[in-house]
Image: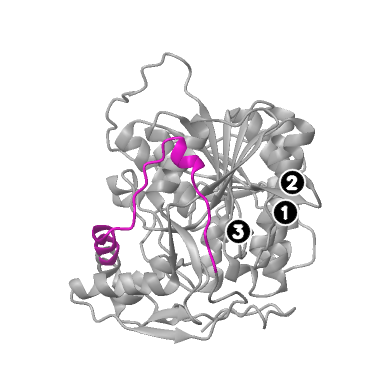
Amino acid sequence: MAHLLSASCPSVISLSSSSSKNSVKPFVSGQTFFNAQLLSRSSLKGLLFQEKKPRKSCVFRATAVPITQQAPPETSTNNSSSKPKRVMVIGGDGYCGWATALHLSKKNYEVCIVDNLVRRLFDHQLGLESLTPIASIHDRISRWKALTGKSIELYVGDICDFEFLAESFKSFEPDSVVHFGEQRSAPYSMIDRSRAVYTQHNNVIGTLNVLFAIKEFGEECHLVKLGTMGEYGTPNIDIEEGYITITHNGRTDTLPYPKQASSFYHLSKVHDSHNIAFTCKAWGIRATDLNQGVVYGVKTDETEMHEELRNRLDYDAVFGTALNRFCVQAAVGHPLTVYGKGGQTRGYLDIRDTVQCVEIAIANPAKAGEFRVFNQFTEQFSVNELASLVTKAGSKLGLDVKKMTVPNPRVEAEEHYYNAKHTKLMELGLEPHYLSDSLLDSLLNFAVQFKDRVDTKQIMPSVSWKKIGVKTKSMTT
């Protein structure tokens, strides 16, 4: 079990077993020890441990290695004398979560990260690796403290374990919860039955636990939940922001926009949205559902401050997103992998806009009982359009970029109408970073810088929507 966290816990790890209730205390840079609950055995029992015997609850205690660099005095740009708002970022060690946690901390929110660190374990399971080398979560947080003087609290545990989540809520007392803490890959959810079950259990039960924690321990807490534009599918009508007004047989009503999920992952997001909408109505919870498009990029102002703050960038066929993958493929001379006809069109946004949108949602909270839906993207592109943009940008850098057509491993329309509305965040002040030549140049140069870390065997898709089966699938090559 110690191996489970060995990639993230510095130095010494000792394991103790306890049948009594464990108090959950955060790790904060500068402290020596922290207590952390083990991943929920109900959600990961079959997937991670692959054994039938029940396990006792366990607590990890890991020694934190202090960073000796002197931190500058903390300064605040907030002229208000009021107490800083407290934001819990669930999934704060991940791609979007880490960038968001740093951005909010820089904006003088008091931030804590709640994470079970399982995303790093997925890499070990599947033989994958981020293009960028990433530091452990403890080193990341310590470096942030050393550079800025700002503390980020850390709670290591599984939100599917309600006791752990409840203690985290009571300890930190968040004003807002930003929920990134879900298995976020459609291909991962389609590998085999066990990954499909894990995805739905982890995502749906985890979100239910967050809703109950808000009800019991923070009635005024605002939930900012990361959804996905994939909930809508590709209908032959315009996609509205969450709701659509329909006239049928002479009667008119405004209803939730129809959902057409295209994987077990996307279905989990649909279930989340329904559960959140219900609890807003039944319990008066305030919630904002950010239906995010496909994110690209890796750099934010905060992650560029030091190499230990660097974000992950996935290029493989399981976790990598289209534009990031294309840039890495171009950097190593691999033909761009266009699935099918390449007309699949989606909304896209820069990761710098992800963190900006979350900040906007927190600063403009939903009302009690309100379930808001914002479509979170800035531009629409087809796969073919992205391939053309990368080819053009690559040629300017002297890269010989070619394109190849790959049989589509997914079940999806390859040519379709797509027009999604996305005005609400703009109206609240979003200043988007559009996909420019300079940004593509930067992303390509970044991929070239780390191209020696690319495992080209991970580029081609190996997960098929139609061939998913009951047997646990090995992802070794």
Asked if labels 3 and 2 touch by Cβ distance under 8 angstroms, the answer is: no
Tag 1: residue type? Answer: His
Observer-nearest of 411 and 198: 411
Provide the secondary structure element on which disc 3 rests.
Answer: loop
In the shown orientation, is residue 445 left or right of residue 86? Answer: left
Residue where numbered disc 1 is placed: 271
- Contact check, label 2 and label 1, Cβ < 8 Å: yes
Location of residue 61 by image quarter: top right
Q: Nearer the viewer, residue 256 or 130?
A: 256
Q: Which residue shows up at 28% across the image and 80% down it?
A: 401
Hey, what amino acid is under mark 2?
Answer: Asn
In the rendered image, which residue does mark 2 sit on? 275
Q: Nearer the viewer, residue 431 or 145?
A: 431
**In the image, is residue 99 part of the stretch drawn in magenta?**
no
75 left or right, relative to 267? left
Indicate the quadrant containing the N terminus: top left, top right, bottom left or bottom right. bottom right
* Position of 195 relative to 145 (above/below): below
Looking at the image, which residue is at 72% across and 54% down?
Answer: 271
How packed is label 1: few (under 14 Cα within 10 Å), some, or many (20 or more)?
some
Looking at this view, name the residue that lies furthest to the top: 81
